[in-house]
Image (cartoon, rainbow, N blue to C red):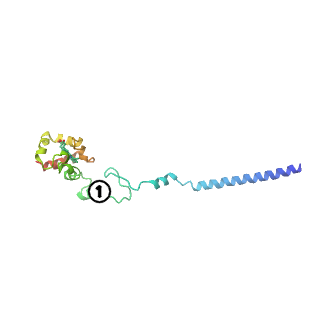
Amino acid sequence: MSQDKEFFTTFFSIMGGLAVFAIILVIIALNLTSEVSDYKPDEIVIENIKPVGEVYIAGESEPPAGSAVAPAETVAVADSGAAAAPKSGEEVYKSNCMACHATGAAGAPKTGDAAAWAPRIAAGKDSMLANATKGLNAMPPMGLCMSCSQDELQGAIDYMLDQSQ
Ligand code: HEC
């Protein structure tokens, strides 16, 4: 009997010691996780794999903070000195229409070629603006100036017509 008693005393003191040890481990583990709970793997991964460059469209989105590139509109404003001024007919023509209309490329009526423009002028300004807006054969919609307003397109047409009378 006394042997049994000795066995149980030793057995329970070892079990008790292990239980205390286990609780200590749990406490240590909880402390460790609380220390790293600020760690947000998603944000860190996204930060590390984000592209080195970003595309922004002048006038439609803001350049990323810290970017050295000035938005095209800012440049245009600096040039013309007027805030958010619509582009002049000449500006639109030079940046969008000249490629085809200065040379007559792809069968475009050439700027200065009165004969090429005469039948189009005869059809009326509205018809020309409509055709320039929606495109006509090799003439791409809006002359590819997708940000151009109707006024700006009309300005570019007037600029060409002024030189093609
Ligand atoms: C890719 C070449 C190209 C570009 C760029 C281009 N055009 Fe044209 N454009 C043409 C061609 C080709 C025609 C003749 C289409 C036809 O009659 O078949 C034409 C015709 C026109 C006409 C006559 C439409 C009519 O009613 O007959 C107008 C107006 C015009 N373009 C305006 C513009 C303006 C404004 C721009 C710039 C914002 C521009 N184009 C840019 C190729 C171009």
Task: Check disc 1 and report the residue beneath it.
Answer: 74
Residue 116 image position (x, y, % from top left): 13, 45
- What's under tag 1, amino acid-wise? Thr
Ligand 1 quadrant in view: top left
Determine whether, in the image, residue 88 is placed left or right of residue 118: right
Look at 23% across and 46% down and name the residue there.
143
Residue at x 69% of width, y 52% of height: 23
Q: Is mark 1 within 8 Å of ligand 1?
A: no
- Left or right relative to 112: residue 32: right
Closest to the observer: 119 or 7? 119
The percent position of residue 125, horizontal first and vertical second, equals 16, 42
Residue furthest toward the front? 106
Q: Residue at x 13, y 42 (%)?
A: 121
* Front position in the image: 109 or 61: 109
Question: Nearest the camera: 96 or 78?
Answer: 96
Q: Say how many tags the image has.
A: 1
Q: Secondary structure at mark 1?
A: helix
Percent coordinates x, y for residue 29 in the rendering: 64, 54
Location of residue 50 (image quadrant): bottom left
67 on left or right of 93: right
Residue 36 location in percent, x, y? Answer: 57, 55
Q: Residues within 10 Å of mark 1 (few under 14, many from 20)?
A: some
Residue 125 position (above or below residue 76)? above
Q: Nearer the viewer, residue 153 or 74?
A: 153
